[in-house]
Every structure is written in structure tokens, then in C-alpha cells.
Image (tube, rainbow, N blue to C red):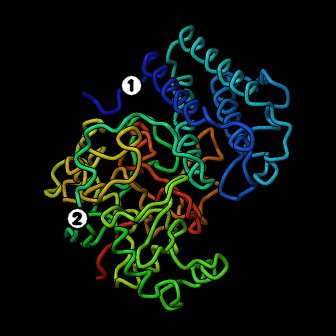
Amino acid sequence: MSSHPQPDVPLLRNMLLAARERTLLLAEDLRGDRLLGPRLAVVNPPLWELGHVGWFQEYWCLRQRRGAASTASRIDDADALYDSALVPHRTRWDLPLPDLDATLAYLARTFARVIERLEQEGATEQLAYFAQLAAFHEEMHCEALTYSRHTLGYPAPRTEPPRESGGHDAGSWRGDVELRGGTFQLGATAADGFVFDNEKWAHQAYVPAFQIARAPVTNAEFAVFVDDGGYRRAELWCPDGWHWRKEAQAARPAYWRQEGADWHQRAYDRWGPIRPHQPVIHVNWYEADAYCRWAHRRLPTEAEWEFAATTVRDGAGPKRRYPWGGARPGVTHANLFGMSKGVVDVAAFPGGDSNWGCRQMFGNVWEWTADWFGPYPGFVRDPYREYSEPWFGNHKVLRGGCFATRASLLRGTWRNFYTPDRCDVFAGFRTCALP
């Protein structure tokens, strides 16, 4: 069975419905002060975020018609309220936003009209593209709203109950795998189905032989760096990273605190001892880079990460869509949305190993890479021009997804990107041996 079937109306309906059900699940306990929350640079007001996903779906799936100017929204001043390209982040708390009931009604009306259009017109090339764009965009905002709930100390969102997933107390998974390197096609092809513009198109890249860790850096490993004065030693940090550390007064990962001789960690609104074999999470690129200097290691390049995740040892076969092959992600492959309620040990999910023997290259935590986010050769932006191009040059690339990522979003070529100071993301890292 193909891992990326051609979209038809039932598939598109299910994608849109899955995203909307998750949005409503995340919003079910947002009342009172939680609807806006404090004015922070790394979160949106939840009420604004809910309206924005409805606006985006309406804009691309209903208001855009081939060969015609975009039509008006069904609500007044929608573009002035919800167009993220036009509305500065700092002003989103001050907007005359519709209340929660009106916002949810807007989402419901928009969804119903999109489904109606799909059923009337079918999965035309244009409508199928924009329906997928809207579903994936909403899934990304669901993940971002999950980050926000954690940042703001709200309770964990209600999710599907944990299912059998290969062991949540699986322990450590130490050591490196050696990759012989070579030339491969970095990026996506048209055969991959829907892909974002920053993945286009596959182009030849050469990767020298290298050694990469079998798993991400764990809490226990990172705690040794902290205890060894890693946050006090300027020589371990790049200049921008040391400036960030001083400005933030960072002395440990963002959600750690010391109780006696032990490190504890906050997850949403609850504190508990760190789990030693879980990957360190909520560390930014600067912290990952400093750890690498301390450990005499380095971060993988983006090309190295994709090579380790998607190529096969003998070089005879094509790249894999997923580290384990072509089968759609399941409960034995990766810790993605719906597979657990949070991070699990790095040795879990052996069924998701890459052909080279790397574990958890999908799921659990996003992984920082060494590279700045930039265009591939011949880049041409897609209709949603704000998705990639504005962020080239000042964001770092992350790969692989996390426990809050919907499986349908991911493939081996998928690129995430954040500024190197962001600690709120469900991100960790794995390391490479120095040459």
C-alpha cells in the first residue's frame, strides 16, 4: 500500500476532520484568563490562534478561485484580525477578537462549507492542494498550541490513551553508528505527493563518511554537562549563544530545577524527577551547541541527518520515506501524536530504526541540526508565500518530529525551523563524532 495515496474526497475530509477534532480538544478547557494568557514572544493568545486556523482554512479553501481575486470572509475584518502576515505578533492581545463561542461557530461554519465544496466539486488539483495545506497548517498550529499550554503551565491536553508502543521504560541506547557517506538526493520529489516549498526539489548532495549517535542525548547525559559548569564556561558557547545565556540568566534547561542533589523537571503544570533515559527536551540550539563542545562532539548537518534517516546501507535502493521503510507510521515505529502522553526513553520504538541503526529519528523530540534554514537550489515559493521564505537565514533546521506531531505531517524530507534561542519547542538533539 502506498504511504502517500492520491488525495480523494474521503481522505481530504478525514484529514480536515482529524485536525479540527484535535483543535477542539486543545480548546475544551480554555476559558477566562486562559483565552489570552500573558503577552509572551513565543506564544500566541489561544483565542487568536483558534480564529487564525479557521481564517486560514476559509482563505485558502473557500476564498481562492482560479483566475479570480480572493473573495471576502464571512466575518467582518477577518484579514485585519487573523492574517498572520499582516498582524504583528505583539498586537494580537489587543485586537477586538470575537468571543470563544463566536470563534468556535466561525470554525464550524467554515469547516462545513469546505466539506460541502469538496463534495460538490470533487478533489480537483487546486482544491485538493489547498485542503491538504489547510489540514497540515492546522496540525502545526495544534502542535504549537500544545507548546503554548506547556509554556504557560496549563494542564496537559487530553489525548488518546496510551497504546502499546514498544516500552516507555526501555532505558538508554548508547553508541554511534558509522555511515560510509556518499552522494544522494537531498530533498523531496514530485512522487512524494504534497510537500512544502522548502523541501523542493531533490538535488545531489555529497556527505563524507561520519559517525552519528544511535539516539538523542538523554537527561542523564545533559545533567553531567550542567553539573560540570557547562552554563558557566564561556569557552563552550558561540558568541551569540553566550550572549543569550547571559541575557536569559540560564543556568540549566528552561524547565529544570534542583531539589537537594536531584534534578526535577516541569511537564505542563506538574513537577517530577527527571527520567534519566528520556531525551533532554526544551533545550535550544545554543544549549545543544554548547553541550557538543563540552562533549567534544558536534551537531549533524541537515544532509547528514537525512542521509542517516532515509538511505540504505548497500546504496542499491531508493531513499526511504520513513526511517523504517515505506509503511505508514504505526504504534511500533515512533512516538508521535496519539502514541503516548509525552516523552519516552530513547531505547523505545526499535521498530522505527533506520537502516543504519539510528533510533527515534522520527518522534519523541525534534532534533536540532547544525544548519541555518535556507532555500534549496532553484527554490520557487508556493502560494502560501509566508511559510518559508521570510525565515531563511535566521532560523535553524530541526528534523524528525516529536510526541506532539501528527504522523501525517512527516516524511524524511520534512524540515522544521526555529530561531536558535527557542526553548519552548519540544526539541532535543543527537550528536556526531568529530572527524
Disc 1 versus disc 2: distance between alpha carbons?
Answer: 38 Å
Please say whether residue 428 is visible from this viewpoint.
no
Residue 405: x %, y % from top left: 44, 44
Residue pushed farthest left?
Answer: 314
Query: Residue most toward the top?
Result: 120
Quadrant including the N terminus: top left
Residue 155 percent coordinates (x, y): 55, 46
Between label 1 and label 2, give the one nearer the viewer.
2
| 217 left or right, relative to 142 | left
Q: Is 303 or 183 nearer to us in this picture?
A: 303
Question: Relative to 302, is 374 on the left or the right?
Answer: right
Residue position marked by numbered label 1 in the rendering:
6
Position in image of residue 323 (x %, y %): 27, 50
C-beta proximity under 8 Å, tags 1 and 2: no
Query: Which residue in the structure is indicated by mark 2?
Result: 173
Name the quadrant of the C terminus.
bottom left
Residue 56, placed above or below residue 300: above
* Viewer-proximal residue among 294 and 127: 294
- For label 2, count other residues whose C-alpha is less than 10 Å away and answer few (under 14), some (14-19) or many (20+): some
Q: Quadrant of residue 392?
A: bottom right
Type of amino acid under label 1: Gln
Q: How crowded is the residue under tag 1: few (<14 C-alpha within 10 Å), some, or many (20+)?
A: few
Q: Quadrant of residue 51?
A: top right
Residue that appears at 19% across and 59% down: 356
Q: Secondary structure at mark 2?
A: loop
Observer able to see residue 89: yes
Describe residue 15's horizontal placement relative to residue 181 as left or right.
right
User: Who's the residue at 63% across and 24% down the image?
Assistant: 61
Residue 276's tag is none
- Amino acid found under the numbered disc labelled 2: Trp
Between residue 372 and residue 318, name the one nearer to us.
372
Task: Choose between 23 and 410: the one closer to the eye.
Answer: 23
